[in-house]
Image: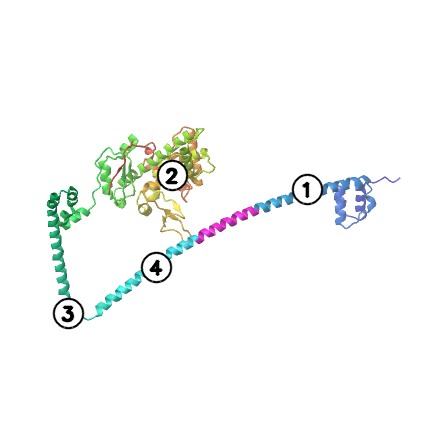
Amino acid sequence: MKKKLSYRDKLVELAYIYDVKEIKDYEKSRKNLTSGQLELILKKNKITIPKDFKSNFLRDNIIKPVSKIKTNLYEFKESKIKDKNRALRKLENFKLDTNRKIGRAFKDLWNQLGNIGLNFLNIIPKLGKAIYEFFANLLTDLFHGIYKQQFEPQKAKKVIIGIASVAVVSTIVFSGISYFSGSDLAKKPKVKHEVKKPEIKKEVKKPKIKQEVKKPKTKEELEKSKAKPKLEVKRKNVDEVILPNLNLKTETVLNLFKDVEYDLSKVRVQKLVKPIYFTQFPRDLNALQSTKLKKETFIKIVLPLIVAENERILEDREKLLVVSKKKFTTDTEKQWLRQKLLEYKVKKGDLEELLVRMDIIPTSIALAQAAKESGWGTSRFALEGNAIFGQWTWSGQGIAPLDRESNKNHKILKFPILRASVKAYQNNLNTHKSYSKFRQKRLILREKNKKITGLELTDTLNNYAQTGSEYTKKLNQIIKQNRLMDFELVKLVNSVKKIELSS
C-alpha cells in the first residue's frame, strides 16, 4: 500500500518530476522549506499545482475563509484610520494655510501702507526742491534783469541821495518821538498823583524805557557772553555726576578725575567707585602717548557704568525673589513682573527662567569685552555711535563697517549715550540663545554659593565673535594683563543726590 503523502511532500515530489533545481538544492542541503515557500518557487517556475493536492478540508473551508474575513476587517479598520488621519491632516493644513494667508494679507497691507508712507515722504523733498528752484530762478531772473538794465549816472546819484536822506530823516523823527515819549512818561506820575489813581502809577513804572537808553555791548563783551563756561567739579565727595554731551577733551577729563580724587589704585583696594557717568568718550583719547594712561582713563569712564547696571540688576533680582514667594501680588507687582518678563524675553510667565536670566555680568568680562570691541574707547563705532561692545543689527540704527563684505548688510548698533550701550550688552548676554551656556554656568556658581567671576565664565563666550576659542583666550589675556579681576567686587559709593552739570 502506498504511503499517504502530505501536501508538502506532494509539492516536493512535483518539484522532482519537473526537475526544479532550486528545490532540489534546498533538499540536498537539508533545508526544510515550508509549503508556502514551495508553492512560490513552483509558481515562479510556471508549474501549475494540481487541485487535488489541497485536500485539507478544514483549512480550505474554515481556516482560510475566517482568516480572509479577519484580514478584510483589519484592512477596513486600517482604511478608516487612514481616512481619519487624512481628514485631520487636511483640517490642520487648512488651518495653517488660513493663518498663513491672513498673516500674508496683514504683511502685504503693512508693506503697502509703508510704501504709501515712503512715497509720501519722498514727495516732500521733491516738492520742497521744486518750490526752492522756482523762487531761486525767480530771484535769479530778477537780479539779472536789474543788473542788465542801464541807469544814467546822474539819476542813480539822485536816487541814492534820496534814499539816504529818507533814512536820515526817519532816524531823526523816530529818535525825537522816543525822546519826547520818554519825557511825557516821566511827567505822567505827577498828573496821576493829583487825580489820585494809584493803579495808574504802577503801570507807569516800566523798566523797558531805561533798557532802551542803555549802550550796546562791545564785541569783547559779546564774545565773553557767548563763550561756554568751563566744566569744573571742585567737590571731593561727589554723590553722582552725569557728564552731558560737551565734546570733552581728554585733558578736561583727567582734570575732573584729579578734582574728585578718582584713583584706580584706591578703587582696587577699597572696592568702591564714585558714580561719575560719562555720556560719551573724549574724541582725542587716542592722542595720549602713554598706553597705560589711556587704558586707565578708559577703565575710569566705563567702570561706573558697568557697576551701576549690575547693581540695578541685583536690586531687581532681590525684588523678584520677594515677589515670587508671595501668594497674592498687587497690581503694581504684576505690572512690574510683566515688564521684566518682556525685558528678559521670557515666555509663558516662567519666573524660574526669569531668575536665571536676571543676574549680573562679571565686571572683568564686561571691561575686557568693552576694551576689545572698542579699541579701548578709540574705535570709530565707539566715538560716533557710543557702541562699546560692537553689537550687530540688521534693522535698527547703526554704523556700517568699512570692511563689510558686499553680500552682507549688517551694521554696528549705535546708542545715544554710553550707559545705553552697557545696558543693551548685558541684556544681550542675559537673553540671547547663543549665551545659554554662559547663563547655566553662572547659575551653577550661584547654587554652589561661589563668586561669579570673569575667568570662570569666559570660555562660554566663544559664540560672541567669529574667532571662537581664540576670542575667549584674548579675553583671558586682557583680564590678567590689566588685573581686571580686582574690580569684580567693586560697588558704587552710596549716592542720594544727583548733580547734573549744565553746559
User: 439 and 464: which one is in front?
Assistant: 439
How many angstroms separate mark 2 from mark 1 (CA)?
59 Å
Q: Residues within 10 Å of mark 3 (few under 14, many from 20)?
A: few
Q: Nearer the viewer, mark 3 or mark 4?
A: 3
In the image, the segment drawn in magenta is 93-112
**191 relative to 412 in the view: left or right:** left
Residue 363 pos. (x, y %): 35, 35
Name the mark nearer the viewer: 2 or 3: 3
Against 323, residue 207 (above or below) is: below
> Neighbour class for label 4 at 10 Å: few (<14), some, many (≥20)?
few
Residue at 16 percent of width and 71 percent of height: 152
**Residue at the disc numbered 4:** 127
Quadrant of res 243: top left
Q: Secondary structure under badge 4?
A: helix
| Residue at 80 percent of width and 42 percent of height | 60
Q: CA distance from mark 4 to mark 2?
A: 45 Å
Give the residue number, with chain letter if any, for mark 2: 426
- Mark 2 vs mark 1, foreground winner is 1
First in sequence: mark 2 vs mark 3:
3
- Give the amino acid type for the residue marked by disc 1 in the picture: Lys
Between 12 and 193, which is closer to the camera in this rendering?
193
Question: Real-space Cα distance between discs 4 and 1?
Answer: 74 Å
| Res 155 label | 3
Image marks 2 and 1: residues in contact by CB distance under 8 Å: no
The answer to whether any part of residue 72 appears in the image is yes
Q: Amino acid at mark 3?
A: Lys
Which residue is farthest front?
195
